[in-house]
Amino acid sequence: MLPTPNNPYSEIPERVCELAQLCRETSTIEPSLYTKFEVNRGLRDINGKGVLTGLTEISEIQSSKTVNGESVPCEGELFYRGYNVRELVAGFLADKRFGFEESAYLLLFGNLPTPDQLAEFCKILADYRTLPTGFVRDIIMKAPSRDMMNTLARSVLTLYSYDNNAEDISIENVLRQSLQLIALFPVLSVYGYQSFSHYHDGNSLYIHKPDPELSTAENILRMLRPDSKYTQLEAEILDLALVLHAEHGGGNNSTFTTHVVSSSGSDTYSTVAAAIGSLKGPKHGGANIKVVQMIDDMMNELSDWTDETQIGDYLLGLLRRQKLDKLGLIYGMGHAVYSLSDPRADMFKQFVEKLSKEKGREDEYKLYATVERMAPVIIGEERKLYKGVSANIDFYSGFVYSMLDLPLNLFTPIFAISRIAGWSAHRIEELINSSKIIRPAYKNVSPRREYVKLNNR
């Protein structure tokens, strides 16, 4: 059962609150010291560009081009193993087939699969999409967490106990473990949600087995829905979401976490659990949830969803810390790397309007589209930004997931279901190419002090 509100493990004693203030007083570093010692906070330089810490052949983000010797912003592009993702998406859509499995193969093995190789890969995933006997009852359904990412991490760590070669980090064994995790992530995520929904919300418990003949996207919808039914468009757009989230350069937080933990020689399950913990954060994988909450709040507050004056006033209120969580952010706008455009958002958007018509939610789509158009202008004027600001993929993905009737609790696990392909490729690349543990430097800025005996303090 879930912990009750008065559970002593959840309460914060008054004395602990007092001690927390002591932590603040002794752990706050003078901001000017970061400039003095030229510290690249967040592993970014003064211009916000990521500090080069490694090499990869897995994916590339392009946000600028060199013109006359100078770097200038350009429309964003994303490449998997040298292939433009726009072309990959256009290819499988033209063939009217699903693309996630093909993309995962490409990321892992470096080349596009032949028809026979793709069929074999899908068969391997289907064969691995079975949990150990009793795992659902004994692990997933015991003490279900309110957070599905925590449930997913716990399940991954528990799988270690079922693996007789869990500590073997040979490439052959790590690949085997990676393929199993790619196959099992949809099952672990959906079953984790079904258990939570049953024990916390009192809903009926549905445990549908995956169908070996179906794609990853189709199986997610099949396992999640009580009647296991879905439309072709629903499956296609969820598959596209999986493709676009599968990988995004080696520098994103969770992938870098994968490299860091892999470099220590740790096992696959511990490495992936650490990456899950990173992705869970609202600054990373949880961003689309914030977009949905923002738009919901906007719809509740606006008397007319088409009134651009009202929309503009709300967006200004967000930036001025007067609306929603008062953090001064318009969620889904801007990206750490892209400036003019996020190619994933561009590709995703072409399906959003189509799905909104199928679901009868065209008015909401029009509001999203208006916010996408107005927000960059308002941000530029209010913050005096000269770097371009555009919608990122999180802006529309949450809306799509809600139209697919995916519960909010599963938004970030869907991201993980996709990104495990990229994490796996990067873990293998790290193990093959580096024998050094990743250890960045931190400069100590505290003064030296003389020890004082206990009775003299």
Image (cartoon, rainbow, N blue to C red):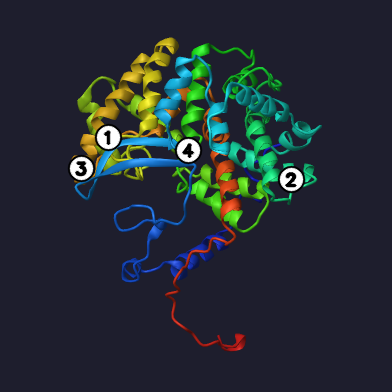
Identify the element where label 1 is drawn. Answer: helix
Q: Amino acid at mark 1?
A: Leu
* Label 4 neighbour load within 10 Å: few <14, some 14-19, many 20+: many
Question: CB atoms at circles 3 and 1 under 8 Å apart?
Answer: no
Residue positioned 56% across, 48% down in the render = 429
Of mark 1 and mark 2, the one earlier in the sequence is 2
Label 3, on which residue? 382
Question: CB atoms at circles 1 and 2 under 8 Å apart?
Answer: no
Identify the element where label 4 is drawn. Answer: loop
Q: CA distance from mark 3 to mark 1?
A: 10 Å
Label 1, on which residue? 315
Label 4, on which residue? 81
Quadrant of the image containing the N terminus: top right
Of mark 3 and mark 4, the one earlier in the sequence is 4
Identify the element where label 3 is drawn. Answer: helix
Residue 242: x %, y % from top left: 51, 29
Label 2, on which residue? 160
Quadrant of the image containing the C terminus: bottom right
Q: Amino acid at mark 3?
A: Glu
Of mark 2 and mark 3, the one earlier in the sequence is 2
* Label 2 neighbour load within 10 Å: few <14, some 14-19, many 20+: some
